[in-house]
Image (cartoon, rainbow, N blue to C red):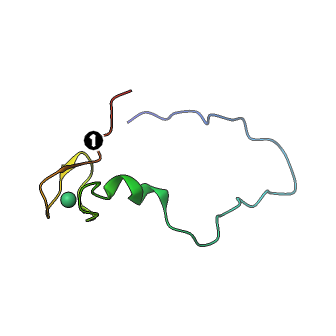
Amino acid sequence: MTDRPPAEPTAPTEQPRPAPEPAGGEPACLLHLVCAECGAITEQRPPATCWRCGATVGADAPE
Ligand SMILES: [Zn+2]
């Protein structure tokens, strides 16, 4: 384990900025978990095999 320095230097501000959080909405991280063939959502991390139709989920075209 190594202690990594923060990416950004801590600015000495007296007023902290609250991180803006998106209110509601569906997490985009689920989009790549949806089978493009049958619409089933896999519980595994992509790339995974669809439990319903057997298609490969989350294996988009390589960049
Ligand atoms: Zn499927």
Q: Is residue 10 left or right of residue 54?
A: right
Q: Looking at the image, is 38 positioned above or below residue 4?
A: below
Of the four image quadrants, the one with ligand 1 is bottom left
Which quarter shows the C terminus? top left
Q: Where in the figure is residue 46, as x and y percent of width and height?
A: 27, 48
Give whichever of 6, 49 is nearer the camera: 49
Q: Which residue is at a point 80% across and 41% down the rendered structure image?
A: 11
> Most extreme residue toward the front, as rendered?
37
- Relative to 45, residue 18 above or below: below
For the residue carrying disc 1, how many other residues have a C-alpha within 10 Å: few (<14), some (14-19), or many (20+)?
Answer: few
- Relative vertical location of residue 5 with respect to residue 52 in this rendering, above or below: above
Residue that numbered label 1 is attached to: 59
Residue lying at the far top in this picture: please name it.
63
Q: Quadrant of the N terminus?
A: top left
What residue occupies the far right of the structure in this picture?
Answer: 14
Q: Residue at x 17, y 57 (%)?
A: 50
Residue 24: give x, y in percent of width and height: 59, 73
Image coords of residue 37 (percent x, y): 24, 56
Amino acid at circle 1: Ala
Q: Which element is circle 1 on?
A: loop
